[in-house]
Image: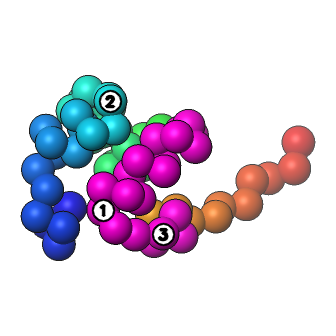
Amino acid sequence: MAKNKIRSKELAAILGITEANLSLLKNGKVKGMKIETLDKLCAALDCQPGDLLEYQATEPA
């Protein structure tokens, strides 16, 4: 976010989430997010989803 000159409080407001939930997102503590949230995040940060997400394979059950 520092590269984009946007504060956590402002980004949380744009996304419509709390700063606490934004912190969880930033620290990889969430298991998923709405496509709408990802869309808003990419628009706010002027980036692509691939800049934010990394695929991690899961073990088969």
Quick one: 19 or 6, which is closer to the camera? 6
Quarter of the view holding residue 57? bottom right
Secondary structure mostly seen in the magenta stretch: helix
Amino acid carrying mark 3 in the image: Gln
Q: Is mark 1 on a helix, strand or loop?
A: helix
Stretch of the chain drawn in magenta: 31-51
Quarter of the figure with the C terminus? top right
| Up-down relation of residue 4 to residue 40 (above or below) | below
Q: What residue is disc 3 on?
A: 48
Name which of mark 2 and mark 3 comes first in the sequence.
2
Numbered label attached to residue 45: 1
Q: Residue 13's spot in the image, x, y percent?
A: 22, 34
Numbered label attached to residue 16: 2
Q: Is residue 25 visible?
A: yes
Q: Does the residue at mark 2 contact the one at mark 1 (Cβ under 8 Å)?
A: no
Q: What element carries label 3?
A: loop
Disc 3/disc 1 C-alpha distance (Å): 9 Å
